[in-house]
């Protein structure tokens, strides 16, 4: 597994290099379709961006991270909520 620094802003989610904090990937909220989370306590969640590729992440703080992304997404999109799907795949 790669170590990542995830930065959530008012327009996008960024993956930063943990050494020099340079941007490796940006997923704008306009490209983010939904988030899926495992029902298990395995710390997995996925950001789904259909026009790009899905982004698998692992964190012991997945619930808090998803909550922050949902709030930022809602501010960006207005009243539109980001869908979160719970599954075991």
Image: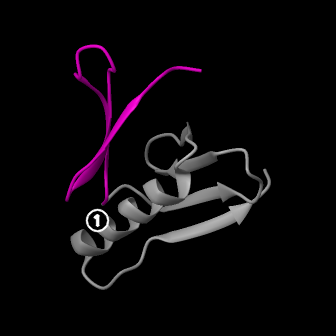
Looking at the picture, does residue 81 appear above or below residue 44?
below
| Residue furthest out toward the front | 60
Using a 10 Å C-alpha cutoff, classify the residue at mark 1 as few (fewer than 14 neighbours), some (14 to 19) or many (20 or more). many
Looking at the picture, does residue 6 appear above or below residue 39?
above
Residue at the (55%, 41%) spot, across then down? 59
Q: Which residues are magenta?
A: 1-29
User: In front: 60, or 34?
Assistant: 60
Side (left or right) of 57 relative to 27? right
* Residue 11 colored in magenta in the image: yes
Residue at the (61%, 58%) spot, across then down? 36
Q: Which residue is mark 1?
A: 72
Residue at the (22%, 22%) spot, across then down? 22
Side (left or right) of 3 relative to 56? left
Residue at the (22%, 52%) spot, across then down? 9
SS class, disc 1: helix
* Residue 14 colored in magenta in the image: yes
Q: Quadrant of the N terminus?
A: top right
Q: Where does residue 64 sit, x and y in percent of width and height?
A: 46, 58
User: In front: 30, or 12?
Assistant: 12
**Quadrant location of residue 16?**
top left
Q: Where does residue 42 sit, x and y in percent of width and height?
A: 72, 44
Side (left or right) of 79 relative to 22? right
Q: Where does residue 8 sit, x and y in percent of width and height?
A: 29, 50
């Amino acid at each position: 597994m790669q170590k990542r620094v995830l930065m959530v802003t008012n327009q996008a989610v960024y993956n930063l290099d943990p050494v020099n904090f340079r941007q490796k990937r940006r997923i704008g909220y306009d490209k983010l379709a939904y988030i899926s989370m495992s029902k298990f306590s395995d710390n997995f969640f996925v950001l789904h961006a259909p026009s790009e590729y899905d982004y698998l992440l692992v964190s012991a703080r997945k619930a808090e991270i998803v909550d922050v992304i949902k709030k930022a997404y809602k501010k960006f999109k207005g009243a539109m909520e980001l869908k979160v799907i719970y599954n075991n795949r």
